[in-house]
Image: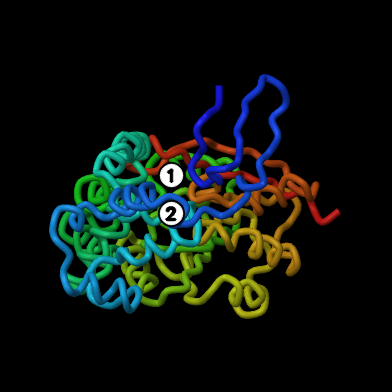
Amino acid sequence: MPCEGRVGSRPDAPRSYSLGAHTEDPDDRRPWTPSTCPVLWSCLSRSLQPRGLARRPARRSDLDEEENGPGHGRRGPFPIGLWREELSRGNMCAVCYVTQVGTMSPAIALAFLPLVVTLLVRYRHYFRLLVGTVLLRSLRDCLSGLRIEERAFSYVLTHALPGDPGHILTTLDHWSSHCEYLSHMGPVKGQILMRLVEEKAPACVLELGTYCGYSTLLIAQALPPGGRLLTVERDPRTAAVAEKLIRLAGFDEHMVELIVGSSEEVIPCLRTQYQLSRADLVLLIHRPRCYLRDLQLLEAHALLPAGATVLADHVLFPGAPRFLQYAKSCGRYRCRLYHTGLPDFPAIKDGIAQLTYAGPG
C-alpha cells in the first residue's frame, strides 16, 4: 500500500517500506529550514517564546528588537528574533539551550533544595566555623576597632588572676567557648604539649607562631628550671598582646623571649643574634604552608640536634600534606600523629604531628 510523503520530501517521489536494510534518503541530509514545513515552524516559534511574551500582544519594542537584533527594545535577554534566526539556520542545540535558560521552571530550582540542605547538615560544623571566624569576627573587628586577641586580653584582665598561668589559660578557654572562637590550641592539644615538655625536659624551646600567647604559657609553665623559650610572631600588633599576656602570667624576658618577625627571616639569625645554638623542642603553630620551609631552614642551619622533637599543629585541618610527606620520606624523622579535634568543634578532625629527629645522616 503506498504511503504518504513525509515532511520535506518531494510529492512525486515514491515511498516504500520493507523489513530489510534501510537505505538513507539523500533528502534526509538536507538542513532543516522554515520553508520545509511552515506548520512546524509556526508551532516551534510559538512554543519557544518566553511565557510572558506568549500571553500578551507584541509591542513596538519587540518589533524593533526583532528587526534590529538583540539588545534593542525588549528588556529581556532572549529576543524573539534570536529564536527565529537559530531556527532558520537549523541550529536546534542553540535553540534548546536558550530556551532552557530563558524559561527555566521553578521546579528545576527546587530540585537542588535537597542537595543544599544535605550539604548544610553534613558540613554544618564547617559552616559554623566559617561564620564564626570570618563573618562575625570581621564584623566585630569593624564595630569595636579591636582585634579578637585584643578583645580576649581585655576579658582576661577583668576575669583572670595575674601571676597564675593556669587560671589565665582557663579564662581564655572560657572566653573562646562562650564569647568568640579564638582559634587557639585548646585544652586537649595543650595536654599533649605539656606532657611532651615534661617528658623531654628541653633546655631550650623554639616556638614559631606566638599568636595570643596561649601555647607559650603552656610551654613556659612546663619548662624545667633554667629552661628557655624563644617564641616568634610576625604580626607586631598580635605580638604586643602576647607580650602583655606573658608578663601578666609572671614570666620574665630571661625565661620567655618574644621575637617579632617572620620565621623565614628569624631562623637564620637565631645562632648569631639570639645565642640559640640548638633547639631541643620546636613547636610549629603558625602557618601550615610554611612548616616544610621552616623545618628545612632549621636543618640547614644545624639548629636541630639528634633526638630533638618537632611538634606541628593543624597538620590535618587545614592540613600540611607536603610537610608530612617530607617527614615520612626523608628518612631522618620518626613520625607519630595524635588525632584530635578543633577546640569547640570536636567534629572537625585535626591532629598534631610529633617528629623525632634522628640526625643529618
- Residue contact at pointers 1 and 2, CB within 8 angstroms: yes
At 48% from the left and 63% from the top, the residue drawn is: 209
Which residue is at the front of the view, 318 or 87?
87
Residue at the front extreme of this rendering: 12
Q: Distance between the residues labelled 1 and 2?
A: 7 Å
**In the rendered image, which residue does mark 2 sit on?**
215
Answer left or right for 226 relative to 307. Answer: left
Q: Residue at x 28, y 55 (%)?
A: 49
Quarter of the figure with the N terminus? top right
Indicate the quadrant where residue 301 lies. Answer: bottom right
Task: Please provide percent x and percent y for residue 188.
Answer: 41, 39
Which of 149/89 is in front? 89
Q: Which residue is drawn at 51% across and 61% down?
A: 287
Q: Residues within 10 Å of mark 1 (few under 14, many from 20)?
A: some
> Would you place residue 79 above or below residue 93 in this image?
below
Name the amino acid, label 1: Gly
Relative to residue 271, is residue 352 depicted above or below?
Answer: above
How many marks on residues? 2
Circle on res. 217: none
Q: Which amino acid does label 2 sit on?
A: Ser
Q: Where in the figure is residue 178, as x and y percent of width and height? A: 20, 46
Per the image, the residue denoted by label 1 is: 190
Element type at mark 1: helix
Label 2 SS: helix
Instruction: Report whether 159 appears left or right of 112.
Output: left
